[in-house]
Image (cartoon, grey):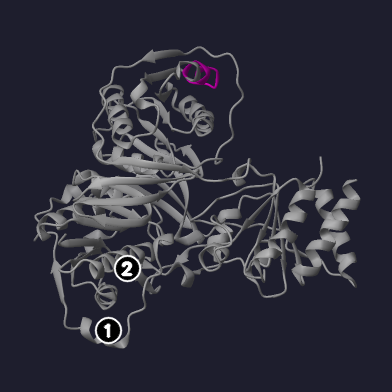
Amino acid sequence: MTAMNGHKGVWVFSEVYDLTLEMLGKGRELADKLQTELSAIVIGNNVQDKANELVRYGADKVYLIDHSALEHFQAEAYLGVIQNLALKGLPEILLIGSTRNGKPLAARLSTRLEAGCIPDCIRLSIDDKKRLVGERITYGGNAIAKITFKSKPQIATVPLRAFEKPEKKDHNGQVVKSDFKVEEAKTEVVERRPLETSSVRIEEAQSIVSGGRGLEKKDDIGLLQDLAKILGGQVGCSRPLVEDRKWFTDWIGLSGHKVKPKLYIACGVSGVIQHVAGIRDSKIIVAINKDPEAPIFEVADYGVVGDLYQIVPALRDALKKMLQ
Amino acid sequence: MKRILVCLKQAVDVSQLKVDPATRQLVTAGAPKKISDFDKNALEEAIRIKEKNVGVEVFTLTVSPEDAKAVLREGLAMGADKAYCVIDPAFQGVDTSGTSYVLSEMVGKVGDFDLILCGDSSLDSFSGLVGSRMGELLNLPQITSVKKVVVEGDTVIAERSLEDAVETVKAKMPALLSVTREINQPRIPSLMMIMKASKKEIVAWTLKDLNIPAEKTEAKIEVLEALAPKMERKKIKIAGETVEEIAEKLAKALLQEGVVGR
């Protein structure tokens, strides 16, 4: 499938519904620029309503694959379905949600379709040669690479929250029930244990108070929680608090959660480049650190050189007073 | 179980990269290289499996556009038995499609194996595609984002970290697994292990030895530019006589930015 001709249309797929919507928003823009159709693929069990709704989020066509055997994500089954649709429909652009399941799916699909793949695109555009251009963070956060394709289909993966969810409105589109055969699974999921997570994902938080090595003991997370509570936000951390101290299970950074809250307050976080890559799109960054040379000050809007054990509670009190 | 293959990438040590402030270009020429972090976790895991299962061999596979002997020797010092590499300047600019193709051809030439272990992503390009592409080319069962591995007879059982769950997944071997950094803490080889490694074999192949047609390594993507990101931040330092004064100034600033409250 390396021919440059014959491919047309922008397609999106993610097993995560919100991410599908975000890609439809971006996909609409790309399809309009190319004057082509925007399609979404929906795979699942009893997902007709979702398919109908995607039209209202901008899809011209929705390929619906609805079957009880497809209720849960299963790599080979989903891969086979998308591969067959792509071989028939020949899209020029395929956006796949960059989740822990979606990214290997994109890699495998790219191999089967002999296509190039640009993972984790934070920006997407069409250049003057009508090629897709993806931008992604690389070299551990040291650079942003602008990459394009030399063949079609052009496959890119898109992380959650990279793009805005579009408005729902009236739009003409059709839902097409598609034939499929279920490809046999090569692995077997024997157990699935949902993680205990707070009700809001950290990617959704409007404000985040995060801790780093500057925290002395696990109980001190409470200080951050008190401040986060006043802000209606969440607590996060940098990688050492997960890897070395095991206080948390998830960190913020290039290899962890990438966040873009309105307010990010880094308390005792040194600010290595991998951490910064995970917070770079925050609106306002505040750094509190007793080391005046800490690199976090270079990427902060407001910096306080001082002891977080004094500053954080004082800030909480000051905000509490002002917000009352 | 007889043999585990581990893919090792020689990656740019991103913590030591410098940026030219005038052009925002990265100074990659002469930048220090090392075994890509996640791949080191993969190798560590392979060695741990070998230590628990008598008679298992661990071989490493590396493709690189330039000399990678130091990286290969480090892998051998950690406990790998033999290193295979394809060093060819033609690799400059090869993308994940070409890299995975060459690695899978290397696997074919090495022969029988039970497991292939890879890092979930590489330290420098951080694409995270090569392992899954290889698994697909070799038509193997694959398990990604692995944070725990147990081998039982001809079956591998792995725990995967997902965004909202932990999955336990089973596959018949041969299989390919890509691991996260959570899985283990890689060992640091002792002087003794380093000395022993100097006697171990490094097998160097060329693309020609593997009969790889040129079109298989042609990149399907093209990097237009890679520049240091612009971080235009205000960098305002807030100071004061007392902690309360500092806190008040900061709170006021945040209120004015419209990032707190309603």
State the residue at coordinates (26%, 41%): A111
Q: Is residue A240 visible?
A: yes
Q: Are marks 2 and 1 in contact (CB under 8 Å)?
A: no
Vertical side of B194 occupied by B256: above or below: above
Q: Please state the extent of the stretch shown in magenta in the rendering.
A: A51-59
| Relative image position of residue A151 (x, y in whole percent) | 29, 38
Q: Nearer the viewer, mark 2 or mark 1?
A: 2
Mark 1 Cα shell of 10 Å, populated few (<14), some (14-19), many (≥20): some
| Prevailing secondary structure class for the magenta stretch in the rendered image | helix
Q: Which mark is residue B194?
A: 1
Chain ID for label 1?
B
Mark 2 Cα shell of 10 Å, populated few (<14), some (14-19), many (≥20): many
Q: Earlier in the sequence, mark 2 or mark 1?
A: 2
State the residue at coordinates (44%, 36%): A128
Please name the amino acid that badge 1 sits on: Ile
Q: Nearer the viewer, residue B156 or B90?
A: B156
Residue marked by disc 2: B44
Under circle 2, the secondary element is helix
Residue A167 falls left or right of residue A192: right
Does residue B18 show up magenta in the picture? no
Please name the amino acid that badge 2 sits on: Glu
